[in-house]
Every structure is written in C-alpha cells, then in structure tokens.
Image (cartoon, grey):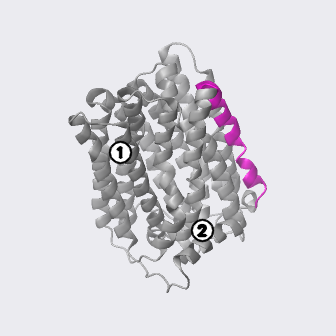
Amino acid sequence: MTAVDAPPAPALHGDRRFRTFWIGQTISAFGDRISELALPLIAVSLLAATPVQVSVLTALIWLPNLLGLFLGAWVDQRTHKRRLLILADLARAAVLLSLPVAYLFGAITLTQLYLVALLSGAGAVLFTLGQQAFFVALVPRSAYVDANSKLSLSRSLSFIAGPAVGGGLVQALSAPVAILVDAVSFLASALLLRRIPVTEAPPPPRRTSTLGLVRDGLGLVLRHPVLRAALGCTTTVNFFTFIAAALLVLYANRELHLSPGAIGVAFGVGALGGLAGAALAPRLSRAIGLGRTAMIGVVVFPAPLALTALIAGPTWAKVAMLAAIEMVSSLGVMLMDVNLNALLMAVTPDDARGRRAGAYSAVNYGIRPLGALVGGALGTTLGLRPALVVAGVGGVLAVLWLLASPVRHITTLDDPAT
C-alpha cells in the first residue's frame, strides 16, 4: 500500500477516554507556556541574570532527562502508569507554587529558581516515561498519527495563546505570580487523569536486573535502524535549537528591547505555524509519505532560527519578524514531531516502552542542557546574534541522519521497516 492509497486513521473524537486525556494535556500545555516565558524573565528582570546564568537555568530544566536510562527501566516494572502520571503532575504543581509564595515574602533567589527548574524537570521526565505506556493503552496502533496530531494541535494552540496571555500576566501580576497559573494547570491535569478508566497489563516477570533492563533499552535504541536514525536526528536538532532556546528571550528583551507583552505576542502569533503543522502532518504524510514529511520538518524547524540575527527596525517590525520566524519554525517542528513520534511508538515492543523511552530521552533530551550551556558560552564570547546563526545552520545538519537510514523510504506505519 502506498502513502497515497493509505486510508486515513480512525477518528478519536468519540473516544471519551482519549478526549479526557487530551483535554488534560491541553490545559497543562497552556500553563507550561506561561512558565517557559516567566522563568527566564524572573532571572532576567528580577535577578539581573547573565547569559550564562540564564543558560544554566534552561539546562537544569532538562538535566533530569539523564536519569531516563534508569527511570525508564523502573517505569516498565510498574503496573499502574496512571498513578505515576498523577504523581508527576502533583509534584510539579507543588514545586511551582513555591515561587509565588517566596515572591510574596520577598525571598525569591536564583538558587530557588534553579531548584524549581531541576525538580519540575524531574517531574516532566517521570510523566513522559509513564505516558508512553499509558498512550498505547488508550490509542490503537492505526490511530497513532491521528492521536499525536491532536496532542500536537493542542500544544500548538497553547503556543499561540499561551505566550500572549503569559506576557500579559507577567506585566500585570509579575512573573512569579503568573507561574501560579501553570501550577493550577497541573492540578487540573491530575484530576482529569483520575477520571480515565484504563486496563493496564502487569509487566512481564523480570528476567534481569534493573541494570540489565537499562542495557536492554539502550541496546534496542542503538541496534534498531529506525530508532538509531531518529535518535541521531532529534539529538542533533535539539542540541542546536537549545543554543537558541537559551538565548532567545534574553536576546528579545535586551538587544531587541521588546517588553514581556511584545515577546509574548510574537511567540503567540508565531505559534500559528505549529497549529498549521499539526493539522497538516497527517495529510502530508499520507500524500508524500511519513519519512519524507518528517525530513521536511527537520529542515524547516531549525533553519529560520539563523534569521533572528537579522531582526532590526522599529518595534512593530521586530515583533513581526520574530513572529514570522517563529511561525515557520513551529510548522517545521510539528511536521517532524507528529511523524517521528508515531514512528517511535510503532517500532517499540510493548514490554520495552518505558526503557526505550528512557534510553531515548536520556540521550535526546539529555543533550539539551549541553546545548543550552554552549548557547550561553557562545552568547558571551561571540555575541547573541552570531550564536543564533550557529544554532540555525547547525540544526539543519540533523536531516543527514534520516537521509542515510530506512526512514526516508517509510510511507506508512504498515511498511516492513516498522
């Protein structure tokens, strides 16, 4: 069956369990957009952080992913994945609530900000690893692309409204108080997860030690040609895009002289590209193939970041240029994520989802702190604009991994390579 002949995946709108999960993740995603803007703004505006200190903050959010190798093996041995998701949501809500409380008492410090970044990042890792197995209990294989598209669509919507709302809340209430909204979103997600009935199969009897499971997960990722290529691709693109991620808010605030509200509007308008990408990804993959669509996304995602160095002019022009760059980049990341995520789920054995996700995220997400730290160093030594050019140009090289692998020949999830 060719990509053109492949029938569309079944609709999930009538599935109450998936719909509840989808709503919870949508609420949480909107809260995340506020914290992503508010955390660096706390460091920049309240604590006068340097580029290196801001990059350390970004790095700490992603550092816990290095624990994914061991945590993924542990998650595979748990029967009740839903409980892990609820625990992760509640933990992140409690950690974030500490910031507005400290701010009200005038006690907020850079050390606390670092701890919040680290602990909330750890909660995110636990949630992501548990979600892998929970997802396949809710969604049939034939609907993986459709379900990922819907979740990505919500994420894109959050990038549209979230930054604008977040920027307004930061200006009206201050950044620490605005983070309260994200904490509430995690509580809402936990409550909705409790309402989802799901039958979770017990894990198979343990055949080896935890260390053996870790080796098994890492070996699976490195041996499988599709998993290996996807890992090399996403790790490369994450390294370079996080050079930009560590510097972009700082660049927009200090060099472009944009207010938090203007930054939020630019990011929100730019996220329209992600909305289009999430909606377009299933259709494009059916038209030209899953692998080709993913490769287009891998190029379109990082390439526009190099153009941020050219932003100049009056405030309205700066906001418009930043929004346009974000729009194209957001479209690319959705074309990449929707298709590669579906592919990863399709090729992973059911009894190895946690440790595969743990091994994969330990490398793929574990590179993000390094990218952020390199971004801080490049921003300090070369300047913010040259560092952003390096991020955009370097990120495009990630597509070479897919070009040299079976991924470029995969048209649907029914192909023999999957």
Q: Nearer the viewer, residue 150 or 394?
A: 394
Is residue 257 a member of the stretch shown in magenta? no
Within 10 Å of the Cα at label 2, are there few (<14), some (14-19), or many (20+) other Cα atoms? some
Outermost residue to the right? 404
Quadrant of residue 358 within the rendered picture: bottom right
Residue located 42% across and 24% down the image: 262
Residue segment shown in magenta: 382-405
- Residue linked to disc 1: 31
- Residue linked to disc 2: 346
Residue 271 vs 183, above or below: the answer is above
**Counting residues from the N terminus, which is met first, the one under dot 1 or under dot 2?**
1
Q: Is residue 67 visible?
A: yes
Residue 63 vs 43, above or below: the answer is below
**SS under mark 2:** helix
Residue 42 on image: x %, y %: 37, 33
Name the kind of residue labelled 1 in the image.
Gly
Is residue 400 a member of the stretch shown in magenta? yes
Within 10 Å of the Cα at label 1, are there few (<14), some (14-19), or many (20+) other Cα atoms? many
Q: Is residue 111 left or right of residue 352?
A: left
Residue located 75% across and 62% down the image: 406
Mark whose residue sits in front, 1 or 2: 1
Residue 273 on image: x %, y %: 54, 38
